[in-house]
Amino acid sequence: MRFFKIFCLFILTFSPIFSYAAETFFVDKVVAVVNREVITWSELYKFMEFSLRDKIQLMNPDEKFRYFREQQQNFLERLIDTKLQLEEAEKFGIFVSDSEIETAVAEIKRKYRLTDKEFEEALKKEGLTLKDYKKMLKDEITIGRAVNSLVRSKIVITDSEIKSYILSNPELVCDDEGYYVSQIFIRRREDEGELKSKLDEILRKLIEGVSFSKVASQFSEDSSAKTGGAIGLLKKKEIAEPLSQLFSKMSVGQISEPMLTEEGVYIFRLDGVCFPKDSEKLYNYVRSNLEEERFKKEYKLWVRSLRQRSYIEIME
């Protein structure tokens, strides 16, 4: 293995690959070895581009490169886990065909109404080629299938566990189905530039990880600012259909995209849900929560086991 590592370093040292980021060129280098495969800085950079594509949209090149440098170690560990999971998927004959990837890419372009050229231009702005994107998408789907087959499918939740969870979380039970919601509201202005500027600042703070309640207290322009944006329980049958559809598709803790109305712009966070006692929806919701909690534990144990039986070296 040591010979293999030295050989890889030799190849990369005498065949330099140059990568571009934040107006800076630098020689590519090996950042880790996983079994018989090397991870280079350029591969790690592309992995971060793909994984953080939504988060970095508002960042300029210098901000993005600085953020990537700060997050490098965290994402290197994630990329190592990705390599190990792909190896495990291959071992069990789990794969994704090229035709499936082509179908997935076509669906993405259709969803966002992009031509082939527009799609490739969008990828280029994120520092990715179409080939890079297809490979990462293929890896992502392959891992998803492997995890479902080797981890998630083995989780079983009993009725007694569901009942116990409901007793421990009484806020899940209410007379009518509803949603616990917080919001940020910005009034419409004649100067659209001013509205956009304030909205960009709010979104930037949320992306940076500032708590929703803190941002709402600072920026929201309605009475909910006093409570950190919290507006309490909204009964499903008493709210407008678009809001009901929005909240029903959100997971607890999720923040919505800005919603433009005649009054102004709303950003919502779903804080919780509740259902009538003994309803099928309540039981299904709790079962899903318990499955997700169990999955997170089992997934961590699974990845740890993959690491324990693998050769991993991170370069200084």
Image (cartoon, rainbow, N blue to C red):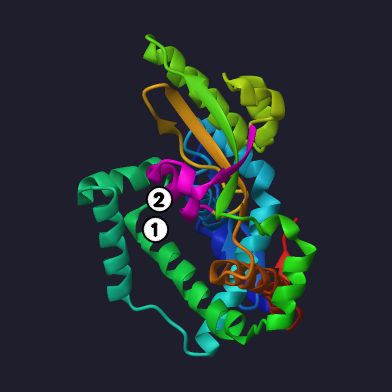
**Which amino acid lies under the numbered mark 1 shown in the image of this protein?**
Tyr
Left or right of residue 130: residue 76: right
Residue drawn at 65 percent across, 43 percent down: 69
- Whether 19 is drawn above or below 11: the answer is above
The answer to whether residue 125 shows anywhere in this view is yes
Which percent across, then down, holds residue 42?
53, 53
Residue drawn at 72 percent across, 74 percent down: 163
- Tell which residue pokes out farthest to the right in this image: 168
| Residue 234, picture quadrant | top right
Residue closer to the observer: 291 or 85: 291
Say which element carries label 2. Answer: loop
User: Which label is found at residue 128?
Assistant: 2
- Whether 303 is drawn above or below 175: the answer is below
The answer to whether residue 310 shows anywhere in this view is no
Residue closer to the observer: 209 or 105: 209
Residue drawn at 65 percent across, 58 percent down: 76
Q: Quadrant of the N terminus?
A: bottom right
Bounds of the magenta span? 230-250
Disc 1 and disc 2 in contact, CB within 8 angstroms = yes
- Whether 154 is drawn above or below 42: the answer is below
Left or right of residue 128: residue 39: right
Q: Earlier in the sequence, mark 1 or mark 2?
A: 2
Mark pair 1, 2: CA separation: 6 Å
Residue closer to the observer: 28 or 290: 290
**Which amino acid lies under the numbered mark 2 shown in the image of this protein?**
Leu
On the image, numbered disc 1 is attached to which residue? Answer: 133
Which percent across, then down, holds residue 136?
45, 63
